[in-house]
Image (cartoon, grey):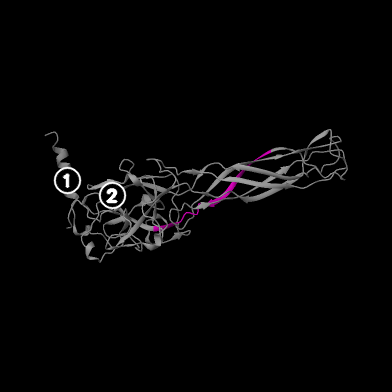
Amino acid sequence: MAYLPRVLLLLLLTALLTRDTSAVLPPGFSTFFASARCPDGWFDEPSSAGRLIVSVADGAESGVTVNRPLKDQEDREHQHPYSLSLNLPVKHIAAIDCCDSHGACAGSYPLAGFTSNHTSGLPFTQLILCTVNHTHPNNAHLFAPFSAVAYFPGSLSCPAHWQPLPEAQGRVLLPGTDRIGLLQSPHAPLASGQLPTHVHDFVATLNVSTQSYAGVDGCCNDELGEAGSYRLPSVASVASSNLPYIQLLTCINQNQTFDSALPVDTYLFSESGCAPGWNTSLELLGRFPVANPTLGLPGAAFGGSSLSPLETSAVNHTHLVSGTIELPDCEVGLISGCCSSGYAVTGPVHFLSTSAPAPVDIPFVWLPLCSQTTPTGSPP
């Protein structure tokens, strides 16, 4: 009799999780597929092509797009503007202003430019996103299991027996496993239409060569600058990764059944793990799904390495930062030579630096992604 409570619990759960006629797929139901084209009775969701999918709970925000779509297997490049200033201090010399022009003037020298281009480094996979044709005769008896998560483009609210998934608001659904469950990245969710942005720190080191004069340091010429190595901590300004996305209403199934009947090659996110007859899609684990671009290759994986299970920080990337400051001449009434030294030389001063690593700020939420192996029930 020790096991009776467990048996009763299982019977109760079975009674609760039985199908009813409301389980049939509602209009607008959209999900990814492993196939090269949508199955019969389904159609491509064209406005999503070449875009990440950012989930929203308010249908009024669904359909908002940011940036232009990606091409086939494109991890888009981006760059950052930067600005810095070299402050060259005065180094006094006992001379008049005429006539040697080898020395550079003291003063402040601003410089503005752009970092090198770099991709996001995120891991992607491109998959076809298909929407059910609710009136097609093939689809009259299709249904999804309890806790299935789907997109509903064009809908203002979740259908009956489905509800919004608040943990996904403003985030990309990232394929995970039952062991990971639902896990958010630390990034704040995107507001409607918000550009994901990030910054990079960098240090510019400018080595200003030295010039010597046949004279002495001292009063009273204060035109010349001082040579030396100048380390300038700087920040490359906020910029977008230029990755495109579309916001789609995202809902979770509350119909009380674990049975399902969906086309072969269906991928389905699930809040509570894969239902019977479904397996975790390990080949997509930790890769950001992009709705297959126009003329894209469905199923192609590109970009960086897949995120490890439970990893909540996106992949870091860096940029090269370079520039040239031109130091103007300041004439002094001495000739170059021995033995007064340490004066800045006129002419170009170059620098080349690598920025500190930083991730692109694409907020995401791990969610089990399942693929159907065997339909587990027949329609009600």
> For the residue labelled by badge 1, is the local secondary structure a helix, a strand or a loop?
helix
Please state, as top left, top right, bottom left or bottom right, where the N terminus lies in the image: top left
**In the shown orientation, is residue 226 left or right of residue 286?**
right
Task: Report the residue at 86% width, 40% height from top.
Answer: 335
Amino acid on which the number 2 mark rests in the picture:
Ser
Question: Number of callouts in the render?
Answer: 2
Q: Please give the label number shown on residue 44.
A: none
**In the shown orientation, is residue 367 left or right of residue 359?**
left
**Magenta part mainly helix, strand or loop?**
strand
Q: Please give the label number shown on residue 12.
A: 1
> For the residue labelled by badge 2, is the local secondary structure a helix, a strand or a loop?
strand
Residue 306: horizontal and vertical position, in percent? Answer: 40, 43
Residue 273: horizontal and vertical position, in percent? Answer: 28, 45
Residue 85: horizontal and vertical position, in percent? Answer: 68, 46
Task: Report the residue at 34% width, 45% height from top.
Answer: 283
Disc 1 crowd, CA 10 A, few/some/many (<14, 14-19, 20+): few
Residue 217: name its quadrant. Answer: top right
**Circle 2 sits on which residue?**
371
Span highlighted in magenta in the image: 230-247
Amino acid on which the number 1 mark rests in the picture:
Leu
Q: Looking at the image, tell me whether mark 1 or mark 2 is earlier in sequence order.
A: 1
Residue 307 is inside the magenta segment: no
